[in-house]
Image: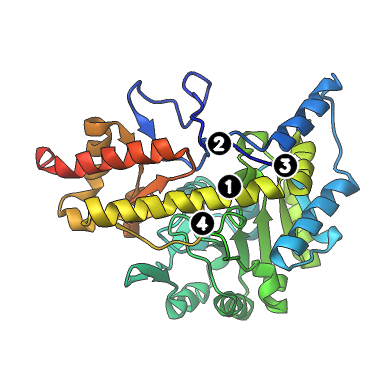
Amino acid sequence: MNYDFDTVINRRDTDSLKWNVGKDELPMWVADMDFRAAPEILEGIREKLDQGIPGYPVITDEWYEAYINWWSRRHGFRMDKEALIFCAGVIPAVSSMIRCFTKPGGNVLIQPPVYNCFFNIIKGNGRRVQESPLIYKNGSYEMDLDDLEQGMSDPETSLMILCNPQNPTGNIWERETLKQIGDLAEKHGVTVISDEIHCDLTIPGREYVPFASASDTCAGVGISCIAPTKTFNLAGLKTAAVYVHDRDRRKKVTDAFNADELSEPNAFAETAAVTAFEKGEEWLNKLREYVYRNRRTVEEFLDKEIPCIKAVKGEATYLMWLDISGLDCDTSKFGAFLRSETGLFLSPGIIFGEQGRDFLRMNIACPETLIKDGLNRLKAGASNISKMK
């Protein structure tokens, strides 16, 4: 089937968080695609709606089978049915598990630059952010495993949040790296929450490694957060899952989710997930190709037109991490200047941790015409930077 990723859909005045901006502004910030969801998924939701009674639903065997078959087919990892737990969103689930596996005032280990919500929910739950920064070298990122072990060895540290694949850098962590994380976590009694919500959004020909599949140890210490929402642009439906292989941890998570009212799906949550995993594969394959072309367009434009801005060579997500240190300016102010001067709204890197100060994050999951518009605005902002000084 042919899928249309080129048509620009007007999302202004539609209660869209992303597009709640000024008339002439172009938002390329929050991780929300500007593509219509797969028609197969929308049809499944319509059929559910046409029943006319969106009452209390249950999680059926079909839901479990959809997740299990998808991860087995796409990622070479077969999950156990009893280890899968429904939840109403990854971030609410992570927040609940922070309370479950840490004490007030305890440490939660993260690796900045990293998804900004991690900082917020750790602090919001009365815990302390413990940082083990990634190493930026030769245009890419790697982990400092010695520093990671030092963080895990702190007696106040009982939980780590891993971003796999990594947001905002686009890194895909290799199996050996994941195994080392699992070994360190077991050694120091740390539970690892692996946020894998971007796992299906890799560049063509490149796949991610599920943390729980890296080793038996990783499966034992890990809790994987998975969902169709980023992959199929269904974020507003609040449908996700966690995979908890270890029985003791699974019991704690189940109890926590029940207490926090995260275990009850909305009327369309199951239908959307099942339809996505059973009928959305062709759409996803075409989407990945389209987003990859957008990525190449950005890289080539920067090389030719704005060589002082470098694109980090990410292999996953539809987000690009732009190194703007070559602009030789106060990078913490450049994002605001760019928005006020050109209308281009990107995510300032500083929100992902101090290590993101010299970066901007750009959402490229949109029609090519918007990519080109955004790049021309970025060039205009960089060209007029003298106005900011």
The residue that label 4 is drawn on is: 105
Quarter where residue 272 is shown: top right
How far across and down, in percent of the image, does residue 160 sit?
56, 64
Q: Residue at x 83, y 63 (%)?
A: 80
Instruction: Specify whether residue 93 is in view.
Output: no
Question: For the residues carrying marks 2 and 3, which lies nearer the camera in this image?
Answer: 2
Give the residue type that dot 3 points to.
Leu
How far across and down, in percent of the image, does residue 373 sit?
34, 36
- The quarter of the image holding the N terminus is top right
Q: Looking at this rendering, what residue extends furthest in the front direction?
A: 2
- The quarter of the image holding the C terminus is top left
The residue that label 2 is drawn on is: 35
Q: Residue at x 60, y 48 (%)?
A: 286
Question: For the residues carrying marks 3 and 4, which lies nearer the camera in this image?
Answer: 3
The numbered disc on residue 153 is: none
Give the residue type that dot 1 points to.
Leu
Quarter where residue 29 is shown: top left
Q: Residue at x 62, y 34 (%)?
A: 236
How far across and down, in percent of the image, does residue 263 sit?
77, 43
Q: Earlier in the sequence, mark 3 or mark 4?
A: 4
Instruction: Specify whether residue 70 is in view.
Output: yes
Give the residue type that dot 2 points to.
Phe
User: Dot 3 surroundings within 10 Å: few (below 14), some, or many (20 or more)?
Assistant: some
How far across and down, in percent of the image, does residue 182 sit?
62, 76
Give the residue type that dot 4 points to.
Gly
**Up-down relation of residue 40 to residue 128 (above or below):** above
Query: How far apart, in angstroms, are the residues tagged by discs 4 and 1?
Result: 43 Å
Helix, strand or loop at label 1? It is helix
